[in-house]
Amino acid sequence: MGTILRLHDLSKAFGAVTVADALSYEVQEGEALGVIGPNGAGKTSMFNLITGTLRPSHGRVEFDGRDVTTMSPARRSHAGIARSFQVPQPFSGMTVFENAMIAATQSAGLYGHHAERFCIEVLDQTELLPKANAQAASLTLLERKRLEMTRALCAKPKLLLLDEIAGGLTEAECSSLVQTIKSIHAGGVTIIWIEHVVHALMAVVERLIVIDFGKKIAEGEARAVMESPEVKEIYLGIEADA
Amino acid sequence: MDWLNAIVQGTLLGGLYVLFAAGLSLIFGVMRLVNIAHGDLIVLGAYLGLTVTTTVGLHPLAALVIVVPAMGLIGYALQRGLLNQTLGDDLLPPLLVTFGLSVILQNGLLELYTADPQKMDAGALETASVTVGGLTLGVLPLLTFGFAVAVIWGLQWTFYRTGLGRAFRAVSDNQDIAQLMGLNRRHIFGLAMALALAVTAIAGILLGIRTSFDPSIGGGRLIFGFEAVIIGGLGNLWGTLAGGVILGVAQTLGAKIDPGWQILSGHLAFLIILAIRPNGLFPRIAA
């Protein structure tokens, strides 16, 4: 098991707003890493830097042994990086199945029946198969979140980025989604998961990093990080000695 | 009978307008690009057809085999080399650049082919006719209408039944997400323009068989194409077919009242529909 992703001294600012500040960490193949931090800490921007929709002003992104810092989002997608969005962004004029097929044919490079069969497998895993022919615009929030995950998985990713996929779901919906994510992780996909719903996150990830103002302020075994005074103080807004 | 005849002839004339419009509709649907040079590209197609027929000695319809792929290649190169650079949040740059392209095309054609009106010779096809239920229908207009229906059907099939069409729709729906799914937007746009100009080649050749043409007539063809697209509703290909037919029928009915009213009545029909249904008859994309 090698290192699949390495962020090296990554910095990016929009004017006075710093979204990444000398950010460095590594993710091992097959790992599930959780990311927490206050709103506006730069978590989603970090995903944009990894997928290539944002270019860093300083630093490097290495993926699967290659420097991908200057690669286009489309080429990084071919290389094996896939993500889901906090606010689901399906191709709303297309069916669920067509949404999946775009990822399978374009990103994973599958053809014809292979692509179709693979999409059906993934839809089965993400429990969207009964909705395969529904227009994406007609889906409920949970279904849209599942579609985000389906599309990401149909890209046959080596690295799956989940952005607050449990946000806005009911307790029951959330736990069914956690089961799906566990099964995906068990299948060998490396996951980085940004999440405010901490109990959902803790059910899946082994390791956590905490980000604030674009800076990594804590990193380590998930429970230990959650109990550290830095997290209590900065992330949860509680004074350490209170 | 006279009025029925006018309606039928107008429908067939509409087929030509559908061919003018199909490429515009496709390009707007996929990349929200308003191509001001579209009319001049139709004329370019006609001149390419003329060159092929006169130098190789092919029948104009046989020349399609050469002109259609040639225009497709020109379309891909034009999109990758020039138009992709103009696309963004601002609608003005593509308008300005395609307007400039229109000027360059007109003057280029003027330089190469002079201002003399030209016409392609399609032999007996031009005057052949069939009589159906007392109406005399020209074979060429029937053929044109057949091409128009086939083109719209083919584009519709491509859009909704093929992987390429799925890619067109994905890019049209959300470019950024499509990029993250591994779609190369620039290449997809290139293919869309290639397809649009392939259709434009058909339009140009049928135009060049039907009437005489010179380098300055592109603007008028652009207007007819625009009107057909907008009457039908933006982004809806079957709507474009309906729009072309409505425009054609309005023109022949106007000409029936007074021969001088043909073009005017087409524009009036367009204005009336625009006033009543600002998004066209069958809009797919909210304006």
Image (tube, coloured by chain):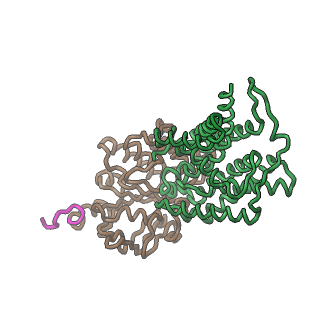
Chain colours: A brown, B green
* A7 left or right of A35 in image: right
Answer with left or right where residue B184 lies relative to residue A20.
Answer: right
Residues in magenta, as a range? A233-242
User: Depth check: A184 or B233 in front?
Assistant: B233
Q: Left or right? Give the position of B286 relative to A119.
A: left
Where residue A15 sits in the image (x, y, percent)?
34, 73
Q: Magenta segment, principal secondary structure?
A: loop
Q: Residue at x 72, y 47 (%)?
A: B207
Q: Residue at x 43, y 50 (%)?
A: A89
Q: Is residue A43 magenta?
A: no
Q: Between residues B277 and A61, which one lies in front from this camera angle?
A: B277
| Residue B154 on image: x %, y % | 66, 42
Report x, y in % for residue A214: 33, 69
For residue B100, above or below residue A154 = below
Residue at 31%, 47% in the rendered image = A168
Q: Could you say where residue A240 lies in the image, as x and y percent from the top left?
A: 17, 67
Which picture quadrant has residue A108? bottom right
Residue farthest to the top, as pictured? B133
Query: Which one is in front, B201 or B107?
Result: B107
